[in-house]
Amino acid sequence: MSSIADNIKSVTQRIEKATLQSGRKPHSVRLLAVSKTRQACDLREAAAAGQQDFGENYLQEALDKMANLQDVPALRWHFIGPIQSNKTAQIASAFCWVHSVDRLKIARRLNDQRDPALPPLNICLQVNINKEASKSGCSLDELPALVAAMAELPQLTLRGLMAIPDPEHGEAGLRESFRAMNNALAQLRQDQPGAGPLDTLSMGMSDDLELAIGEGSTWVRVGTAVFGPRPQKS
């Protein structure tokens, strides 16, 4: 069985190959290791192999891992799951990225609860690109107003957009969804140049990262291909 270090090397090679094939600059796409449900020892092994960015969906689980891994330097924690209002204070204080902001109420709470002594919290707005009832996210039509409102929140830095397209749409549908996200980000840069860096597209996972990179992804969120299959629930 491959080690986590071997898996990271393999995924990194996939990322580098897809980046080169899409004509983009080397190192313009970064790996976010999705570590939800994984043990702290797995993250420690990944960190020893050079991985610094970890994505977590569940707040208490993430806080437990942070406490366990305090001795590991330079880890960066990304919150990538749905956000409940009663969790925003701890998310605002413990994470450096949040990829899953989908409404202004949550953005305001994160802003108000972010310690001004900390760097601004990096934010991606989650878009429900395929309008799935089971997924969080704003619509493309709601994006311009939400981005404009974010400009009033000084403890947040709007970095870009995140999406999880429906894999049931097949390769063509995935590519179309990723392209729509890239186009939406480009439109926001043009229409609201002062809104933030707008340099980030968080999209693509273990099975579709090459498609996402081909359409402009800058963060690919990879769990299974890094850590292996998740244990079966008992």
Image (spheres, helix red, strand yellow):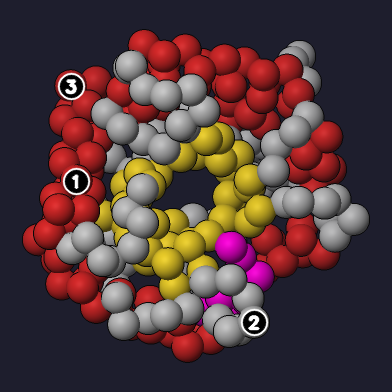
- Residue 123: x percent and y percent? 42, 63
- Residue 166: x percent and y percent? 27, 38
- Residue 107: x percent and y percent? 38, 76
Name the image quarter holding the C terminus: top right
Cα–Cα span, label 2 and label 3: 45 Å
Q: Amino acid at mark 1?
A: Ala
- Residue 209: x percent and y percent? 41, 26
Q: Residue drawn 14% across and 53% down?
A: 190
What's the magenta region? Answer: 88-96
Side (left or right) of 51 relative to 167: right
Q: Amino acid at mark 2?
A: Ala
Figure check: 201 above or below 19: below
Q: Earlier in the sequence, mark 2 or mark 1?
A: 2
Category of crowding for the residue at label 1, using alpha-carbon neighbours closer than 10 angstroms: few (below 14), some (14–19), many (at least 20): some
In magenta stretch: residue 148: no
Residue closer to the observer: 80 or 131? 80
Residue closer to the observer: 70 or 39? 70
Q: Is residue 124 visible?
A: no
Circle 2 residue: 117
In magenta stretch: residue 91: yes
Q: Earlier in the sequence, mark 2 or mark 3?
A: 2
Name the image quarter holding the N terminus: top right
Residue closer to the observer: 129 or 70? 70
Q: Earlier in the sequence, mark 1 or mark 3?
A: 3
Residue 172's label in the rendered image is 3
Q: Residue drawn 49% across and 55% down?
A: 80
Residue 186's label in the rendered image is 1
